[in-house]
Image (cartoon, rainbow, N blue to C red):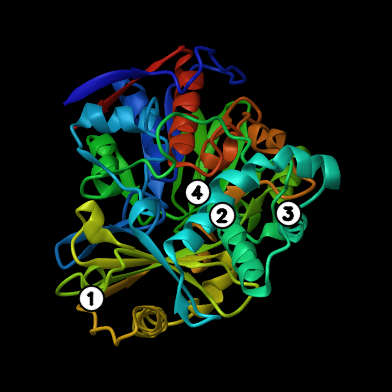
C-alpha cells in the first residue's frame, strides 16, 4: 500500500455543501466515483459506491483476450508529464509504456486503392496535429465565434487548393482529428472551444499502463465498499440529507450524494432527481455534446501486419464523409498479437448492432485490402458498444456551437448543499480525459472533507 496527497491541480477548497459529512452515497464506480470513495475512506468517512454494471471502472474497461489485456475504453495517459494520473500509476507501482503509433504508421487510401507514400502521410499528420490547430485563431477571425469545426475544415482545406484525392484525404484526416478528440461529428463541435483544455507536458499519445487501465482501477478500488448490479433510479435530496433508490426499490440514506454517471446517461433523464435539477443545470446538460467512438479488438497467432510492413494502419475510406479508421498493432506497445481498430463517430454505423463476427469481418476486409493479401481468422474478438450501453450512452463529452466550457463547470457545482457531481463532463479544464474525471473526484472529496488536498491510497 502507498499513499499520496492530491489536490486536483488547485489548492482551493471548494464550498457549497451544508451539514456535517457523515455518510456519502456515490453513484457510479468509474474513476471519478472511486477517487471520491478512496479519499473519503482515508479520512474515515463512511461511504458506499453503487454501480449498475457487474464490474467497476465505468468507461475504463479492460478485457482479456486469451491472456492479453485490451482496453475497450480509455487507453492512454495523454500528456503524462505532470499528469496526476501518471503520478497515481507511479505511486501504485504500475509500469507505463510509451505508446505513440505515429512514427511507425503507414496509410492506405481505399479511394485510390494504394498505399500512401511516407511523405503523403507525413503531410496529413502535419495538417492534423500542427497546421490546422495553428490556424484556429485565424479561422475564428474569418468565421466568427459561433462557427463549427466542419466550417473550419471546409475553409482551411479550400485554401490549400489541393487536387481532388488529396483534398478528400485532408478533409478525412481533419475529420478524424476532431472526431477522435470530440467523439462526434465536426459540425457538432465548436471551433472556438476546440483545444481549450489545460495541457500537461509530454506527447499527446503519452503512455499506456501495463496491464491496461484495469490495473489503475484495481489499485484505487481496494477496500472500498462497492455494490455491483445496483441500478440507481432516483436521487432525492432535502435539507436533511439524501435518499438514493435503486431499481429493486432498495434505498440508501446519506448526508450527501455524489452522482458520477456519464453525461450521456444524464441526457436520458437518468437517474430521476427529486426535486428536479435546476433549469440552468438541465439546460447545460442539453447544450453539451456526447458522441460515439467504438473499438474492435482482434487476437491472432502472430502480428502478420508487422510482417506486411504495416505496424499501424491509418485507412482512408472511399466515403468522403467518413473519417479514417485507425488500426493499431498492440504488439508495438507490449500488448501481444492484437489488432485494435478505432472506429470514430461517423463510421460507427458500420459496427453498431452487429455481432462480434460481423464487426471483425468488416474490419478485416478493409485491412486485407490495405495489406494486399487476405487476413487470417482471429482467435478471439472483443467489441465495445458504448453508444448502446445504457450506463454510458456514448463515449465522452465535447462542446458544440452554442455551448461553452462554463456549462461543464456548472455541472460540477453542488445542488442544495447535499447533491454533488463528478465525472469528466463536470469540469472544463480536462474535458474528455480520464485525468479530468479523476480530478473531478478529487475536487468533490476536497469539498466534502473541506481540505486543500486529499490522500489517495493505492494497493
Q: Earlier in the sequence, mark 1 or mark 4?
A: 4
Q: Which x, y percent locates residue 99?
A: 31, 48
Q: Is residue 21 above or below residue 281?
A: above
Residue 314 occupies which quadrant of the picture?
bottom left
Q: What's the distance in space between the residues labelled 2 and 3, CA to CA?
A: 14 Å
Label 3 element class: helix
Q: Which x, y percent locates residue 423?
A: 51, 40
Label disc, if present, on residue 245 of the rendered structure: 4
Q: Which residue is mark 1?
A: 380
Residue 32 occupies which quadrant of the picture?
top left
Q: Which residue is mark 3?
A: 156
Q: Residues within 10 Å of mark 1 (few under 14, many from 20)?
A: some
Mark nearest the camera among 4 and 2 is 2
- 144 vs 307, nearest the viewer: 307
Q: Earlier in the sequence, mark 3 or mark 1?
A: 3
Mark nearest the camera among 3 and 4 is 3
Q: Is residue 240 left or right of residue 369?
A: right
Q: Earlier in the sequence, mark 4 or mark 2?
A: 2
Label 4 element class: strand
Q: What's the distance in space between the residues labelled 4 and 2, CA to CA?
A: 41 Å
- 75 vs 278, nearest the viewer: 75
Report if the CB atoms under discs 1 and 4 are less than 8 Å apart. no
Q: Which residue is mark 2?
A: 177
Q: Which x, y percent locates residue 24?
A: 44, 30
Amino acid at each position: 500500500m502507498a499513499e499520496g496527497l492530491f489536490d486536483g491541480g488547485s489548492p482551493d477548497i471548494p464550498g457549497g455543501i451544508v451539514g456535517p459529512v457523515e455518510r456519502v452515497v456515490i453513484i457510479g464506480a468509474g474513476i471519478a466515483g472511486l477517487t471520491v470513495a478512496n479519499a473519503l475512506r482515508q479520512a474515515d468517512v463512511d461511504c458506499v459506491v453503487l454501480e449498475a454494471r457487474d464490474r467497476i471502472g465505468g468507461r475504463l474497461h479492460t478485457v482479456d483476450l486469451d491472456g492479453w489485456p485490451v482496453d475497450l475504453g480509455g487507453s492512454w495517459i495523454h500528456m503524462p508529464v505532470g499528469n496526476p494520473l501518471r503520478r497515481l500509476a507511479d505511486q501504485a507501482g504500475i509500469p507505463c509504456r510509451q505508446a505513440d503509433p505515429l512514427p511507425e504508421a503507414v496509410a492506405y487510401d481505399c479511394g485510390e486503392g494504394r498505399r500512401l507514400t511516407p511523405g503523403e502521410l507525413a503531410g496529413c499528420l502535419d495538417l492534423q496535429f500542427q497546421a490546422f490547430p495553428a490556424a484556429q485563431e485565424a479561422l475564428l477571425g474569418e468565421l466568427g465565434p459561433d462557427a463549427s469545426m466542419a466550417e473550419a475544415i471546409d475553409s482551411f482545406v479550400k485554401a490549400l487548393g489541393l487536387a481532388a484525392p488529396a483534398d478528400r484525404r485532408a478533409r478525412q484526416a481533419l475529420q478524424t482529428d476532431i472526431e477522435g478528440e470530440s467523439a462526434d461529428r465536426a459540425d457538432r463541435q465548436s471551433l472556438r472551444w476546440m483545444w481549450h483544455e489545460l495541457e500537461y507536458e509530454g506527447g499527446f499519445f503519452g503512455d499506456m499502463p501495463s496491464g491496461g487501465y484495469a490495473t489503475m482501477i484495481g489499485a484505487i478500488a481496494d477496500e472500498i465498499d462497492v455494490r455491483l448490479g445496483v441500478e440507481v433510479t432516483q436521487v432525492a435530496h432535502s435539507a436533511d440529507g439524501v435518499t438514493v433508490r435503486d431499481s429493486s426499490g432498495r434505498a440508501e440514506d446519506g448526508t450527501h450524494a455524489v452522482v458520477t454517471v456519464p453525461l450521456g446517461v444524464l441526457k436520458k433523464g437518468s437517474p430521476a432527481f427529486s426535486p428536479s435539477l435546476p433549469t440552468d443545470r438541465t439546460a447545460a446538460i442539453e447544450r453539451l455534446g456526447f458522441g460515439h467512438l467504438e473499438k474492435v479488438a482482434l487476437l491472432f497467432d502472430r502480428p502478420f501486419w508487422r510482417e506486411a510492413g504495416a505496424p499501424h494502419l491509418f485507412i482512408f475510406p472511399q466515403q468522403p464523409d467518413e473519417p479514417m479508421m485507425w488500426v493499431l498493432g498492440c504488439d508495438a506497445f507490449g500488448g501481444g498479437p492484437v489488432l485494435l481498430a478505432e472506429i470514430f463517430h461517423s463510421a460507427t454505423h458500420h459496427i453498431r448492432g452487429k455481432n462480434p463476427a460481423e464487426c471483425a469481418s468488416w474490419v478485416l476486409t478493409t485491412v486485407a485490402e490495405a495489406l494486399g493479401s487476405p487476413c487470417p481468422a482471429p482467435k478471439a474478438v472483443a467489441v465495445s458498444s458504448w453508444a448502446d450501453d445504457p450506463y454510458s450512452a456514448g463515449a465522452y463529452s465535447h462542446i458544440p456551437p452554442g455551448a461553452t466550457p462554463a456549462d461543464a463547470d456548472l455541472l460540477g457545482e453542488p445542488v442544495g448543499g447535499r447533491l454533488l457531481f463528478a465525472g469528466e463532463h463536470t469540469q472544463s479544464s480536462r474535458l474528455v480525459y480520464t485525468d479530468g474525471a479523476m480530478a473531478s473526484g478529487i475536487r468533490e472529496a476536497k469539498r466534502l472533507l473541506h481540505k486543500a488536498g486529499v490522500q489517495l491510497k493505492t494497493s
